[in-house]
Amino acid sequence: MKTYFRLLTYIKPYWKHLSLSIICTILYALLNGVSVYLSIPLLDSLFQESGSQKEVVSSIPSTGDSFIPGFLKDTIDSVSEQFNAFLFSGTQLDTLLRICLIVLIAFMLKNIFGYLQSYFLAYVEQGVMKDLRNQAYMHLHKLPMSYFKNERVGNLISRLTNDVAVVLSSVSVTFFNMIREPLSILVFLGIALSISWKMTIFALLILPFSMIVIGWIGIKLRTVSTYIQEKMADITSVIQETISGVKVVKAFSMEEFENKKFHKETNKFFRLNLRITRIRNFSSPITEILSVIIGVIIIYYGGQLVLVDKSLKASEFLGFLFAIFQLMPPIKELSSVNNRIQESSAAGDRIFEIIDTKPEIKDVENPLSITNFNKNIVFENVSFHYDDSDELILKNISFEVKKGEVVAFVGPSGAGKSTLIDLLPRFFDPSSGKIVIDGNDIKEIKIEDLRKLMGIVTQETILFNESIKNNIAYGLEEFPLDAVIEAAKTANAHGFITETTDGYNTIIGERGLKLSGGQRQRLSIARALLKDPQIMIFDEATSSLDNESEILVQEAIERLMTNRTTFVIAHRLSTIRNATKIIVIDEGKIVQTGTHDELITDEKGLYRKFYEMQFRG
């Protein structure tokens, strides 16, 4: 229940709409009771023989046969007498007309308040779902890169979509089922007690049996509901991976393999859904069967009171039956409350698992605010390993980069080059050692300010399903088109942009798939240029390009590197010949440092080996 009560805290901003919904719920329940209560005088008016209006008046039950306290009993009886005097004055036809009009008004008002109650509650439900989804999404942006390395994209998508939708039912359960249904039960129970408390006791015999069944079903539902949400996440992951890798799937003719994998997951989801439906629906017929059993006993017992003992009028008995059978729908609804609470709690657990994840990379208390990079960047004995492994990826890395220098990192795949560069914008933090900018440990600097100093261009170009202009000006609101065009020209991108259908307003598709690799890379460089960062990071930005694209991208990179401190990771040594400093990394350690001319002379060095492999001709 802890998760359930936590979900309810999201209702607080919508208390006005919730209050209106509760008021409408109360009025709905009362008018529902009035409409049933009026059945007794209506029956008497229709079937009472003419001539004795006093006998008709006496048909309204008093509070004599009940457990109502004396002071409340007197008040109710007084109101009842005044109501009777108004209702039964005049002829039987006058009485019939008044009753019909009151019944009509009661039903109309009941449905109006029912509609308003549903609308106000829907406002609260949708607001809670929006706020919960927004909070989970915003918290995702605070989590470190290591979190996303361990989580499947499909699983996260499922939590923010399917699980949040399941949580929606927790609001309606609390402020619809848990308020309207108990109120309806109290109203109809009050009517039943006012007619005959003995017969009412028979009706209440059903509750203990129902509660036992409901409790057992609720436990089962929470377990199965958790499995269902996890399986939905598996399906979402398969879809996301297949769509992202559709070219590979087609290239290897793996459509049938992917179909079988998807069918396997959907079959599991199908069986789990059938199971949860079977369990959820089991409580309703069981409750109804028990209700009918008790109802039959009541009818038999009440029939004796009417036919044999003559202690109960037929109209009162029918009114009692109306009230008792009106109790069944709200009791049935309440029987599903625990089930829905368990389902929403299971979904809530998965959402709060995201929200409760503490970001490892976060600002210290009172962080330093900086706007400029003035002097140098120093790595001091930096070592790093991932949280789920003790194996060091980086081992005691130390070097200095002065402002305006171009530093290149070379080494075999898996040597730790990208991991080293990822430490600079604090995508990860060193396991030991520190990184210092202008004498300040980057952990002491406000993360937002630190990253504003940097522009990053990676091998895997990240673009969005937006216009070319919006991709270049990503994160910059109302940026002038002239500045966007200037950045595109500097990045050698203006030419191909003007050849597209809508120029800078062309939508480039998800991940920029409508463009070539070289075009996507030049757009990412234009984006970095527009940001105008003081520190540039290139992570193998040209490794996947053809020769023509590489030349265009390299020209753009060289323009972007002008008057900036630059970190370059490159497999192609031709792109880093003019670097101020080249650092060679192998197995997480620095094995060589120098310029191209210095390193090429070391015949036994790793750099010379790489050079000879690439330039054998």
Image (spheres, rainbow, N blue to C red):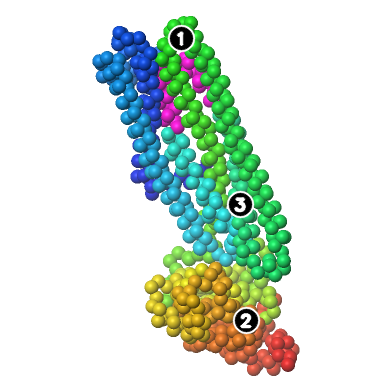
Residue 306, disc: 1
For image coordinates 64% across by 48% down, the residue present is 269
Tell me the mark number nearer the camera, choosing from 2 and 1.
Answer: 1
Give residue 350's position: percent from left, percent from top: 56, 51
382 versus 296 height, above or below:
below
Highlighted magenta segment, given as a residue range: 181-208
Neighbourhood count class around disc 1 (C-alpha, 10 Å): few under 14, some 14–19, many 20 upward: some
For image coordinates 41% across by 15% down, the residue present is 316
Residue beneath label 3, please? 232
The kind of secondary structure the magenta stretch mainly shows is: helix
* Gap in angstroms between the C-alphas marked 1 and 3: 58 Å
Which residue type carries mark 2?
Leu
* Gap in angstroms between the C-alphas marked 3 and 2: 38 Å
Quadrant (top left, top right, bottom left, bottom right) of the C terminus: bottom right
Left or right, 38 with respect to 352, comes to left
Task: Give whichever of discs 1 and 3 has the lower sequence position.
Answer: 3
Neighbourhood count class around disc 3 (C-alpha, 10 Å): few under 14, some 14–19, many 20 upward: many
Residue beneath label 2, please? 545
For image coordinates 43% across by 12% down, the residue present is 314
Give residue 341's position: percent from left, percent from top: 53, 40
Q: Is residue 90 visible?
A: yes
Q: Secondary structure at mark 2?
A: loop
